[in-house]
Structures are given as C-alpha cells and as structure tokens.
Amino acid sequence: MHRFRKKALAITAIAVCSLFFVASCQKYENLNPTPEELDTINAHSIDYALQVIPDIHEVIPMDLVEAMNAVHDTINGIPTVICALHFGDNPPSLVFKQNDSLLGFMKDVFIVKEYLPIDPNCGYRLSCYPGKYLLPINCFRFHDQHRGIAQVDYKYNYIKPEQEGPNNYAYELSIVSDSVFIMGEGNDFTVYYSQKRSFEASQNNDNPNYMKPSEYVILSGTVTSGGISNLYFGTKIRKYDNPDPILIGDRYQNVDDILIIHKDFVPLQYWDPNQSFTN
C-alpha cells in the first residue's frame, strides 16, 4: 500500500508559496536573476511527481474494500478467493487515444461475482446473484489523468449502440471531474471514487420512477493491448435522491448493498458520454 507524504507536501507548499510571494514582490526589480537565484528557484519549485492521494479506506467504506479484497469465484471448478485490488504509487495511464479521438472501454454481459445485500430477506430481482449475468453495456472513459488523479465518464447503456436513435435510447450517466483516485503498479490499476447516476431516455423508454442513486465505486483491472483484462467493477449504494420504499429491494438495490461484477476482457472503443438524441 502506498505511503503518504502529507506533512512533506504541506511543508513544500508553504515553502513554494513563500518563495512565490518573495519572487512576485521582486519581479519588477530584477528581471534577470543570477544563476544562484535560478538555482534557488529551481530547488524550491513544485515536484509534480510528489503526489499524495487519500488512502482507499478514506474514500471508500471498508466493507466494499474488504469485499473487493476477497472476491469469491470458482476457477476450474474449485472455489477460490481473489484479491481484486492493486496497490502502488505508479499506476498505468488509463487515457487512450486513436487519431486524436479519446477512447474508452466498454462491454456488455458482465458476470455477477458478489451480491451482498444489507437485508438478506430483501432480494434485488434485477441484479441477479453470483454466477448470473448483467446484460446492459458498462462504458468507462478516463481523461485528464496525472498519475494518481483523473476524471472519468461512466455510462450504463440499456440499448446497443447500433440500435440507438432519436426515438430509442435509455442509459444511466455519470461524469466525475474530481476526487477520482488511481493506484497500482505496472499495468495493474485500481480506481476509486463516488458517483451519482442520472437517467436519460426516449419517451418510449422513459422511467418516471428513477431514483438517482449515488454510489461508491472501485474499478480494478490490467491494461493490455487493445483493452482492459480481468476487470472488476464494485459498487455500494450511498443514497437515493427520491427513494421509493416499494421499489427499493425490488427494482433497485437497498442503500448499503454491495455489487461486484466482472469481465475477462473489455475492448477499447470510441464512445461519447455527452451524446444526446433529444435535439
């Protein structure tokens, strides 16, 4: 697990701010600093390689972290417990481009690995249970990444792209522009953040009972040629904006329910999170 350097960063920040203030006061007096002054400025300049991100348990509840740390699976008929977390201070880049177009990764038919309901007597009929399938397309797209921080777009598309159109679309969407953290080493990564989903649909696919869920997210996998392998997507429901007690536990997960789904390989593809058929 990565170590933290908050005190060091704070001291560095104070020193840099102090130096900037002094330099700002003097910049009209000395536009040609001496080599010694340049050495002093360079010695106190910000090192962007020194990046501090919060530990995963400071952002994500421990029960979701523990669930991702011990995912129950069956390999070659043998029950196995898998750690789906990748720790480290040097994660791979999750920003992919082709011909100046930003790519993401997307795939349908994820397999449910864990469903941990807060109320074991209240089953979520649409989520299925371990070993079952989730059919909608899960789409992810990262951008503006600087080592361990980034921005992410997420789309949960109910309709295949080739079947979409002005009168036929339905998807959940989340665009997170801050507090997206990445850890890992080599090609292995784990992303963690919180998101709030919105729902957009054509009139014939509208869902007037959509409750706008907010959730914690952990996304882990390995960057390979052409996509992401061994992708785990874990979520825990935080709250609903307009909860309906009749629908929760039936069409929607309960608050605090944990769901972990998996895909062996998710290919890189172009998709636009801002695509709209309403115009």
Image (cartoon, grey):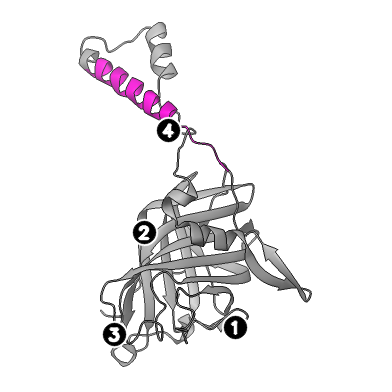
Of the numbered discs 3 and 2, the one sitting upstream in the chain is 2
Of the image marks 1 and 4, the number of the one nearer the N terminus: 4
Q: Cβ–Cβ below 8 Å for labels 3 and 2?
A: no
Cα–Cα span, label 1 and label 2: 29 Å
Q: Are marks 1 and 3 in contact (CB under 8 Å)?
A: no
The residue pinned by badge 4 equals: 6
Residue at 48% x, 75% y is: 117
Secondary structure found at label 2:
strand
Which residue does the image show at 40% across and 85% down from the upper left?
A: 251
Q: CA distance from mark 1 to mark 3?
A: 25 Å
User: Which residue type does callout 3 highlight?
Assistant: Asn
Can you give x and y, in whole percent of width and height, for residue 36 in the image?
41, 6
Q: Farthest residue in the bottom direction?
A: 204
The residue that mark 2 highlights is 176
Q: Is residue 220 visible?
A: no
- Callout 2 environment at 10 Å: few (<14), some (14 to 19), or many (20+)? some
Q: Which residues are magenta?
A: 1-24
Q: Quadrant of the C terminus?
A: bottom left
In the depicted structure, whether residue 119 falls above or below residue 72 = below
Residue designated by label 3? 209
Which residue was labeled with disc 1?
A: 132
Above or below residue 191? Residue 88 is above
Front tag of 4 and 2? 4
Classify 10 Å Cα crowding around label 1: few (below 14), some (14-19), many (20 and above): some
Q: CA distance from mark 1 to mark 4?
A: 43 Å
Nearest the viewer among 108 and 68 is: 68
Q: CA distance from mark 3 to mark 2?
A: 24 Å
- State the image quarter where residue 158 is shown: bottom left
